[in-house]
Amino acid sequence: SQKIEQNSEALNIQEGKTATLTCNYTNYSPAYLQWYRQDPGRGPVFLLLIRENEKEKRKERLKVTFDTTLKQSLFHITASQPADSATYLCALLEGGATNKLIFGTGTLLAVQP
Amino acid sequence: NAGVTQTPKFQVLKTGQSMTLQCAQDMNHEYMSWYRQDPGMGLRLIHYSVGAGITDQGEVPNGYNVSRSTTEDFPLRLLSAAPSQTSVYFCASSYSGAGGPYEQYFGPGTRLTVT
């Protein structure tokens, strides 16, 4: 069956370190992958999109990689801050013109001061 | 721009009652969708629409109806509420078509409890 897996355990790191979150998928061949941030009690907010022909994408302190051979995306936050504490969701686009997103369950990141 | 708005924020229903969750966007987005979010399950797509008059089912459509009479509005109807529909519901919208895909904008959510 089709699955998107994110580490369900919370990731705890110290302020200033690099946080790395993993998104693995099976039985998909997505052309695009997106990452969202969700704070408690709020809707997800878009962070980054990466295409299958892009190995890496950066935006300020954020970096996303996309390995279609390993079927994996890594999401990095460098110089992490307590304000980065949130749940991070990866989402695959099924393709076509429908913009249908399939989400992983998310990973909770806690950055300790 | 208000972005994506949802009403109500909270709702409690009794089993068997019906209600409509409202969603509106003022960004002239063609694509709109409804998700439900449950602990440990992530966001699951209920229904989506690629434009006024066009809707389709997502992953978990049973027990829900949608219609899209205008670009701005995409209401979600629960026909006969069941405890299994207790969840947080999110509406989202985005541009679609050439040059995409595009980021999706989410509303603040409606927390629904069915007793």
Image: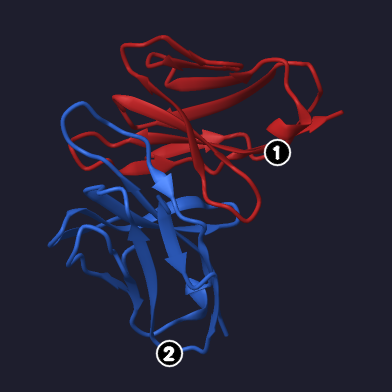
Chain colours: A red, B blue
Q: Is residue A96 left or right of residue A2?
A: left
Secondary structure under tag 1 reads loop
Residue A6 vertical position relative to residue B58 in the rendered view, above or below: above
Q: Residue at x 21, y 43 (%)?
A: A98
Residue type marked 1: Glu
- Image quadrant for the C terminus of chain B? bottom right
Residue at 31% x, 48% y: name it.
B27
In the displayed structure, B50 sits above or below A22; it is below
**Residue under the image location 23 percent in, 34 percent down:** A95
Q: Nearer the viewer, residue B88 or B110?
A: B110
The residue that disc 1 covers is A9
* Residue A59 can be seen, yes or no: yes
Rendered image quadrant of residue B68: bottom left
* Image position of B32 (left or right of B51): right
Q: Of circles 1 and 2, which is in front?
A: 2
Which residue in the structure is indicated by mark 2? B17
Q: Is residue B39 left or right of residue B36?
A: right
Name the amino acid type tagged 2.
Answer: Gln
- The numbered disc on residue A17 is none
Q: Please rate how many residues cluster around mark 1, counting C-alpha atoms within 10 Å: few if below 14, some from 14 to 19, many from 20.
A: few
